[in-house]
Image (cartoon, rainbow, N blue to C red):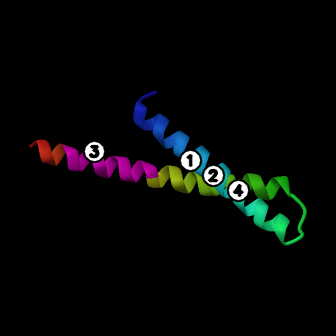
Amino acid sequence: MNTQTKAIIKSGLFSGIVYAGLMAGFDYSDGENFRIWRFILNALFFGIFMGLFTRYNLKKQADNDKNKTD
């Protein structure tokens, strides 16, 4: 597994879990109970989105670096 793939996976996992935790905290502050399925879905969807966004940014950065050296 190369470093780019590791960065994409780490970014997706970390951002998804943090986002889902924040959403669960907001739900708790509104008086709602903790719902594991909602936590998992929030983490999954936001994590996938952020992983794709990280992939796009890394690819764009690599293209810019390649063009600068040419």
Q: Amino acid at mark 4?
A: Ala
State how far apart marks 3 and 2 are (Cα): 25 Å
The C terminus lies in quadrant: top left
| Label 2 neighbour load within 10 Å: few <14, some 14-19, many 20+ | many
Mark 3 lies on residue: 62
Q: Earlier in the sequence, mark 1 or mark 3?
A: 1
Q: Residue furthest top?
A: 1
Q: Magenta stretch? A: 54-65
Q: Amino acid at mark 3?
A: Ala
Check contact, mark 2 vs mark 4: CB within 8 A: yes
Q: Amino acid at mark 1?
A: Gly
Mark 1 lies on residue: 12
Secondary structure under tag 2 reads: helix
60 left or right of 14?
A: left
Secondary structure under tag 4 reads: helix
Check contact, mark 1 vs mark 4: CB within 8 A: no
Mark 4 lies on residue: 20
Give the prevailing secondary structure in the magenta stretch.
helix
Secondary structure under tag 3 reads: helix
For the point 70% across and 56% down, the residue is: 20
Mark 2 lies on residue: 16
The reply to whether the magenta stretch includes residue 3 is: no
Q: Amino acid at mark 2?
A: Gly
